Image (cartoon, helix red, strand yellow):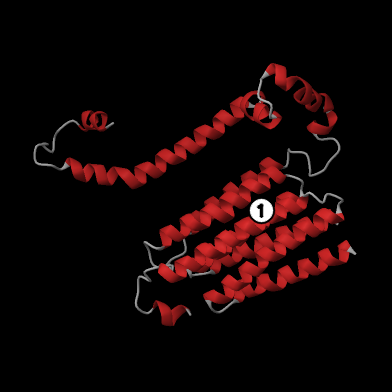
Amino acid sequence: MFIAATIAILVTMALTLARALLGPTLFDRLLAVNSFGTKTVLLISVYGFMTDRPDFLDIALVYSLINFLGTIAVLKFFEFDDPGSETYQEDDF
Amino acid sequence: METLVANVLLTFLVFIAIGIIVLRDLLGAVILLGVYSLIAAGAFVVMDAVDVAFTEAAVGSGISTILFLGCLSFTQHKQKPRGHDSLAALIFVVITGGLLIYGTLDMPHYGRADSAAQTHPELAVRFLEQSASEVGPPNIVTSVLASYRGYDTLGETLVVFAAGIAVLSLLGLKRTRREDEAPEHAPGDTPSADVDERR
């Protein structure tokens, strides 16, 4: 049961990783990275239950906090950054 | 199953590293660096090094991302296209990486029963039982870090200190030298005395 869940999460991680690497726009990458962080949290918690160490759940919670922090930082950067070149918007988004 | 998960995570690391190298968009590279650290931390958790994983996640994925974004707000987002590929740098990096991998060959493999920690269990017992009377702090990890392998920690601190000095010399020296060019200083003044006064 847990083994099947772990393999399914690994496959999902590979798919989101492909989107993060290929994604044409920055927002594709950001969304893929955010969901990849969620998959990491899931993987750690499922792995903890699989190996009979449910205290991995606490670690997974801290990871989700860190992932949230990184996403918020990048989004703040999108909102308040001085782009540096006028063609930045048309080029990248 | 444990090796499968660890191997898949390490394969992800390789793909992300290649992606970071290829990507010309620096903001995308910073985002991918955050994922890289998160996956590395996940691999550390799978390998039962939870404390290392916490450090990697907090420093690599949290603080580093914010620092990189702070740097990016001062620069442009596109990496300049390189006109030439530096062959000498590639050779140097390959040789250095090969030496580092060669250095790991002497170490016991992951999870081996004949590693030093497994063949000398009396060390762990001694740390657990005697560290309170021998060193003092109630946290055994702290007493191992600060006392039993104190010279190792001293070397690490030295490396961090040297890196800090290097960064400070890159950032700060130019600015203080510009303040020095006040008219009361002749250009031929002894620079060493100036450095001492500034400190």
Residue at 54%, 75% in the rendered image: A27
Q: Residues within 10 Å of mark 1 (few under 14, many from 20)?
A: some
Q: Chain of mark 1?
A: A
Which residue is at the far top? B133
Residue at 20%, 45% in the rendered image: B178
Q: Is residue B70 left or right of residue A1?
A: left
Q: What residue is pinned by disc 1?
A: A62
User: Where residue B28 sits in the image (x, y, percent)?
Assistant: 52, 68
- Where is residue A61, by image quadrant? bottom right
User: Where residue B154 sits in the image (x, y, percent)?
Assistant: 55, 28
Residue kind at label 1, given as amino acid type? Val
Image: B107 above or below A71: above
User: Where residue A14 sits in the image (x, y, percent)?
Assistant: 72, 70
Q: Is residue B170 left or right of residue B107?
A: left
Q: Is residue B109 left or right of residue B145?
A: right
Q: Secondary structure at mark 1?
A: helix
Residue at 83%, 49% in the rendered image: A53
Which residue is at the far right? A1
Image: B76 above or below B116: below
Residue B80 seen in the figure:
no
Which residue is at the far bottom? A90
Q: Quadrant of the N terminus of chain A?
A: bottom right
- Between B79 and B94, the one lying in front of the other is B79
Residue at 48%, 70% in the rendered image: B25
- Between B174 and B84, the one lying in front of the other is B174
Residue A92 seen in the figure:
yes
- Between B189 and B195, the one lying in front of the other is B195
